[in-house]
Image (cartoon, helix red, strand yellow):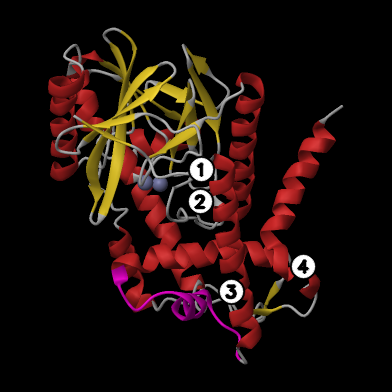
Amino acid sequence: MLCSELNDSSEEIPVVFTSSDGSVAKIQTDLGPIYRIRARVLPHLSGAICLFPLTAGDWVMIDAGCGNEESNSDLEHGMNILRSEFDKSFSVSAIRRIILTHAHIDHFGGVYEWKRRTGAEVWIHAFESRLVSHYDDCARVENMRYAHWLRESGVLASKVQEVLDGFGFRPGRARSVAVDRMLYGGEKFGPLKFFYLPGHSSGHMVFLFGNVVFSGDLLLSKTVTQIWPARMTPQTGLINYIMSLKRFETIAGNYEARFGKKIFAIPAHEDLIVNIPERVAIATRAMEKRNNRVLKLLADSEAPLSLDEITRKMYWSGSTNREFFALSDVGSRVEFLLQLGLIDVVNSESVSCDSPTILYKRSLANTETAENTVEQIVRMYLTCNDSDAI
Ligand SMILES: [Zn+2]
Ligand SMILES: [Zn+2]
């Protein structure tokens, strides 16, 4: 068994022991160990599923992988390693609850199979429970809505299906399963506390357990998490996301003020996050930079641009399986900048169901606010908090 230390400047480094083959990390918390199992959850994307005992014989699993053969076998392998190298009392049937951070395929796609193997209850935020219990219905309706959104964005009608196929939110990809408990945020279950922090998805939750927080895809240690326009999925979009990041920072600060120590985050991908406020600041700066890039592209372009054209200029070189993600990322920024009045729609009089492409240009008004778009939302969040105080 190897001991690996995180390369971080903070003094409060969590103690992590890694299994001999690197597939399982045992993370020591002040309430006992958490086992983080690496699994291939999407092509080219590794994820982590966590397991820990609440009491002897009563284990919780956080997220369930994507449900394909690789993901399930990685998880099965990790569980065997957990038992052989760390805790002989663990058994698959000891998993009583599978609690999902959110209903993206790489987190919930495996829930049917792991509920079948364990008999565990499935818990998820109410807003994403239908995705788990009625996956095919949701996939059909959402794809129809996404197709319309792609046409608005300027994607050619003949290419829409190809872009949607690259995204892969298709009926039959995941098996539906009953949700046993719908969460809303604010619940407590034993030492677990649940927080609703939407933005990356409409029902995204994080779970506090002692001095760690399972942060799902809310905040990652190396990359900026994927954002979608709220126009596509309610409670997503940049504004909700930034508000949730600030709340996450506040939760971390409140914990430190009360208990005199830091919490660290266990994200569903990438490495542990030891300094949450620092990572929030980095993610915020990265978002500001991208927003300003959209504004500059529109200011520099003589002709108005569609979302598809802005995306091509900003990002990508033609890989269709990433196209939907790139359009969504830029789409969330365009939506946000339009809300702030920093860009305009120039062809509102000619858009129709037959000719739906929306064209944007940089607004000549509000130029002074362009440098700190994200900062405005942060101020809005702080003002809301202040004005709620009585
Ligand atoms: Zn996600
Ligand atoms: Zn994910």
- Residue at the disc numbered 4: 369
Disc count in the image? Answer: 4
Specify whether residue 22 is in view: yes
Q: Nearer the viewer, mark 3 or mark 1?
A: 3
- Helix, strand or loop at label 4? It is helix
Label 2 or label 4, whichever comes before in sequence order: 2
Q: Is 319 contained in the magenta span?
A: yes
| Residue identifier under label 3 | 294
Give the quarter of the image for residue 110.
Answer: top left
Amino acid beneath label 1? Ser
Q: Is residue 355 above or below residue 323?
A: below
Secondary structure, mark 3, is helix
Disc 2/disc 3 C-alpha distance (Å)? 21 Å
CB under 8 Å between callouts 1 and 2?
yes
Please give the range of residues in magenta: 303-320
Q: Is residue 362 left or right of residue 208?
A: right
> How dense is the environment of label 3, judged by Cα within 10 Å: few (below 14), some, or many (20 and up)?
many
The residue singled out by tag 1 in the image is 202
| Amino acid type, label 3 | Val
Amino acid type of the residue tagged 4 in the rendering: Thr
Give yes or no for residue 347 being in the magenta stretch. no
Marks 4, 1: nearer the viewer: 4
